[in-house]
């Protein structure tokens, strides 16, 4: 499609979605699965996203997309291990600010962004090791 720059990143009805090039020059749509945090192929929503048909579609930069993916995963997923411990750390920082009736400080915001970048890489590496074709741990390093 002329004018479409890939990869591109979106929030689609509050769900992170990415559109990437395929080896044959086409495009593939990947949406984060709410139950696993992995990537689901969702090519059926390509036109709706690209032509902004639905109205609840927001383009994101790579850096903001990484943050959105991790906020989404932390909100919907439960589990144990280092990734979930880091999700809990972020939740604690956010909860403290809310309990104190204040916005996050710049230092807290930077800490959360850093933690989410780290958890993104960790989660994506696990997905890649499990064979998830949509996994891209390098995205957080770009």
Image: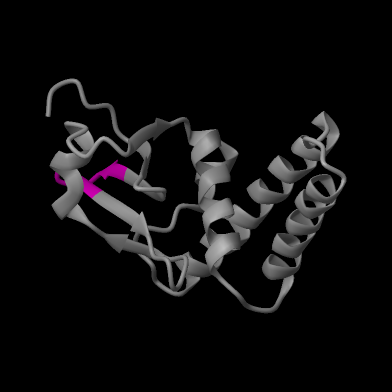
Q: Is residue 25 above or below residue 74?
A: above
Q: How many marks?
A: 0
Q: Residue at x 64, y 46 (%)?
A: 117
Instruction: Pinpoint residue 133: horizontal percent, then vertical percent.
Output: 34, 62
Residue at figure coordinates x 82%, y 45% from the top left: 97
Q: Does residue 23 appear anywhere in the picture? A: no
Horizontally, residue 140 falls left or right of residue 25, namely right
- Tell me the quarter of the image containing the N terminus: top left
User: Residue 109 appears at what percent x and percent y?
Assistant: 75, 37
Query: As displayed, is residue 44 above or below residue 37?
Result: above
State left or right for residue 106 relative to residue 87. Answer: right
Write down the region rendered in magenta.
Answer: 19-28
- Using the image as rendered, state which of residue 13 and residue 22 is in the foreground: 13
Q: Horizontal and vertical percent for residue 130?
A: 45, 75
25 to the left or right of 56: left
Would you say 121 lies left or right of 48 here? right
Way the structure is coloured: one colour
Quadrant in the picture for residue 101: top right
Q: In the rendered image, is residue 131 in sight?
A: yes
Q: Residue at x 69, y 69 (%)?
A: 84
**Closer to the camera, 128 or 47?**
47
The answer to whether residue 122 is magenta is: no
The one of 105 and 40 positioned closer to us in this rendering: 105
- Single out the residue that lies furthest toward the bottom: 80
* In-front residue for pair 44/139: 44
Q: In percent of the image, x 34 and y 48: which residue is there?
A: 13
Looking at the figure, which quarter contains the C terminus?
A: top right
- Which x, y percent locates residue 95? 78, 54
Residue that lies at the very extreme toward the top in this rendered image: 3
């Amino acid at each position: 499609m002329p004018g479409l720059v890939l990869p591109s990143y979106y929030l689609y009805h509050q769900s992170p979605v990415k559109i990437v090039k395929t080896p044959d020059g086409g495009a593939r749509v990947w949406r984060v699965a709410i139950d696993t945090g992995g990537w689901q192929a969702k090519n059926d929503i390509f036109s709706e996203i690209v032509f902004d048909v639905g109205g609840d579609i927001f383009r994101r930069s790579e850096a903001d997309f990484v943050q959105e993916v991790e906020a989404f995963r932390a909100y919907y997923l439960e589990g144990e291990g280092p990734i979930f411990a880091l999700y809990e750390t972020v939740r604690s920082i956010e909860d403290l600010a809310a309990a104190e009736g204040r916005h996050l400080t710049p230092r807290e915001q930077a800490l959360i962004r850093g933690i989410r970048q780290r958890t993104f890489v960790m989660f994506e590496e696990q997905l890649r090791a499990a064979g998830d074709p949509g996994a891209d741990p390098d995205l957080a390093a770009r």
